Image (cartoon, rainbow, N blue to C red):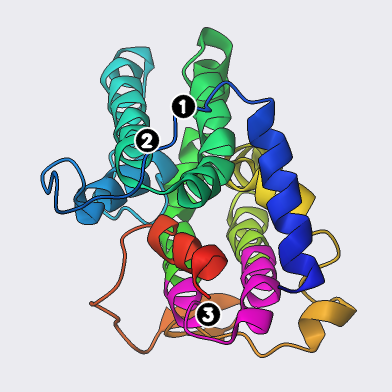
Amino acid sequence: MTTTTKIFYFLFLTIFITSSWTATSRSRSLSSSKAKCDIKTMDKCAVTVMVFGRRDVYLPVNNKEMVPHCKEEFDAEKCVKDYARKCLKPLQKQLIGVIMLGASQVIKQRCTPSGTQEYLSHYKCIKKTIPELHNCMDQLVVSLEEISKRSVEQRIPSACCSFSRYISCSTRPVRQMCKDDPTAENYIAVKMIKGYASEVLDLACQGFDLGGEKCNKLSLPDGGFNEVNASLQQYRNVTDRSFSLLPPFIDIFTQQ
């Protein structure tokens, strides 16, 4: 086990010792309950939680529409957590929780009265940039799946650099297309997008920054996209893939 892997495991175990989401561990058992332990169902719930990467997402435009939106988000969050609690081994469950901890905080904040008003104030920017934001997430998911097939020593560093690239990718269209909304970058790129992966990026991926020494030494998969004029252009449509980043994330950190 590499030093990076050991540090990661120590960090997320520390998080979950103090977290409220530490239910009794149960082994993963797909054969005992296929309906409840269908990873594809969990995967679809996860992409609902993450918003970006879900091409059919509806963006609410007022307070009234936020009510069903928030219910859908909370239901999807519960779906992922229920799957993890009932179907995954302890290590896999805690790995899911590293991502879901940040996602839960983002959802709860967005669905408070003040959070709703903040979201609505940036609605136009989100609407304008969401095709690019979907592409950035798609690139991340496909890249993580390819990284999960690499050697153990390469997986975590490559995943961390891919997360860093994702943040950079998502920030770029906001800067370019929302110049009339000076706080949009902080809300979309930091509060929403980085918030989903905050525990991973801030704890496990310290020092793995796009353009930095560690990431420059790695060759990251392109996820089926080329960068053309500071915008992602898909050249390869990967259909046999996860909807969300959670399944490849589990594989990267648990496969030997």
The mark found on residue 23 in the picture is 1
Name the residue at 69% across, 54% down: 9
Mark 3, secondary structure of its residue: helix
Q: Who is closer to the viewer here, 76 or 124?
A: 76
Residue 157 counted in the magenta span: yes
User: Percent from the top left, x then y, of residue 158?
Assistant: 65, 77
Nearer the N terminus, badge 2 or badge 3?
2
Q: Mark 1, residues whose alpha carbon is within 10 Å: few (<14), some, or many (≥20)? A: few
**Residue in view at x 39 percent, y 60 percent:** 247
Whole-angstrom CA distance, mark 2 to mark 1, is 7 Å
Please tell me which of labels 2 and 1 falls first in the chain. 1
Identify the residue position indicated by label 2 in the image: 85
Secondary structure beneath dot 2 equals: helix
Q: Which residues are magenta?
A: 142-165
Q: Which residue is mark 3?
A: 147
Is 207 left or right of 21, judged from the image as shown? Answer: right
212 with respect to 45 (left or right): right
Residue 183 appearing in the image = no
